[in-house]
Image: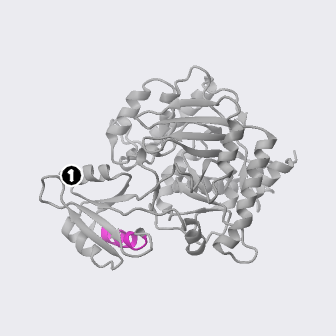
Amino acid sequence: MPMSDVHSRLAALGTGVPEILLPGRGTDLSKWAVIACDQFTQDRDYWERVKNTAAAAPSCLNLIFPEVYLEDGGAIDHKTDDRAQRIRNIRNSMDSYIKEGIFAPPQRCCVYVERSTPHHPKRRGILLLVDLEQYDWTPDSRLLIRSTEGTLEERLPPRMDVRRGAPLEVPHILLLIDDEEDRLIPSLGEMARQRPPLYETSLMMDSGAVAGWALDSEEAWAALAAGLESLAEKAPGRYGSSPGEKPFLIAAGDGNHSLATAKAVWEEYKRAHSSDTIVSGEPGLESHPARWALAEVENIYDPGISFEPIHRVVFGAEPGELLNALSTLSDLRCQPEALGSSAEKRVIRIESLSPNIATASLQPLLDNFVKTNGCTIDYIHGEDEVLRLAADPSRRAVGLILPPVRKDGLFKTVAQTGPLPRKSFSMGEAEEKRFYLECRRLF
């Protein structure tokens, strides 16, 4: 069936209107909604508390693979070291939720989302589809949708195992638009809020609350298309571009590796089901659900979004040797700090002495350091968690606390020089990350 004019306009912008699956009446959404799987990756206790909170109720916890378990092969309840079994359990949960009628009938709509957090009273976004044919995470990408941070290919295979052939998609990806006047999403919110919300719930673990309203009319979709078209028209003049180059419209903010995983699974599926192009193989391949990813788009200038640094913790290192390595970076000042009453300075606070983001020079040095010294590194949201890990005598860890990150200039920097080093910034603190809530049929 030919697309209507508004859907053609959205498709030209790398976006689309999804068919949303939400739990039916009677589901406790405070137990259903669970934070992004890539949070609290060094805090098993957090995820045990999530498990206890959800208990036997239907929950997105059963549909995701918390990355705290990736390092041990996906141990299930600490009884087995079987990543494949955990993935089978996820698939079984997806299948049973579909068959048992956990979900209400699908609704074709975008969703206007309002989220409150312990740090901000309101953050706004639009849940929609993005076209993976219009996205590429590689550094030289010039497509509509681009990555803001480096992507590690070696981190994709376990994530691909979860998504490949899964009947459902459950998103935690947050994308960004560069709307200096902050008009598009608030105007869509005014339109959506004329009716009652699709859902409204508090979020577990003292993470605030969230509500979503349907944008399900041609009028709403046309307003979305018009707003994105306006931003696309301005992009070449704002960031600079070569003749014939696609404008830089949408940036991956949180969930870079999850979006890259969706792209990799789509490319894999496309290769297996097409002869030479996406339209010459399997019937309907060009519109297959796997070609699209469900994500929330937010404005980089939304007052409810703070850009926070993602700190580093190096395990198996001594402060002195790491400080010696850091002293070779002329654009950074590194100040060791003691923890509490301890005289041992196992935390290093970093200050940038140049306009460049600190990770530009720091990350390559750390990559070489951990490789040379046989250490490991993790990326941590929030100073308190860094301090906790550095204070643990059983881990022998050194915490690196990074300086604040500015919003302005992010799109221009990425457009002109490519993605920043991986894990350069975070959209808020750990508890502010997107919660899984809406679903979509995928395979």
Location of residue 194 by image quarter: top right
Mark 1 sits on what residue? 391
Could you say where residue 208 lies in the image, as x and y percent from the top left?
Answer: 46, 36
* Label 1 Cα crowd, 10 Å radius (few <14 / some 14-19 / many 20+): many
Q: Quadrant of the N terminus?
A: top right
Q: Main secondary structure of the magenta part?
A: helix
- The secondary element bearing badge 1 is classed as helix
Q: Is residue 17 above or below residue 363?
A: above
The relative height of residue 343 versus residue 78 in the rendered view (above or below) is below
Q: Is residue 369 magenta?
A: yes
Q: Residue at x 64, y 30 (%)?
A: 198
Q: Is residue 341 left or right of residue 163?
A: left
The percent position of residue 441, horizontal first and vertical second, equals 66, 38
State whether residue 89 appears in this view.
no
Q: At which x and y percent is residue 25?
A: 61, 21
Read off the magenta span: 360-371
Quadrant of the frame with the C terminus: top right
Q: Residue at x 40, y 35 (%)?
A: 206
Depth check, front residue: 388 or 141? 388
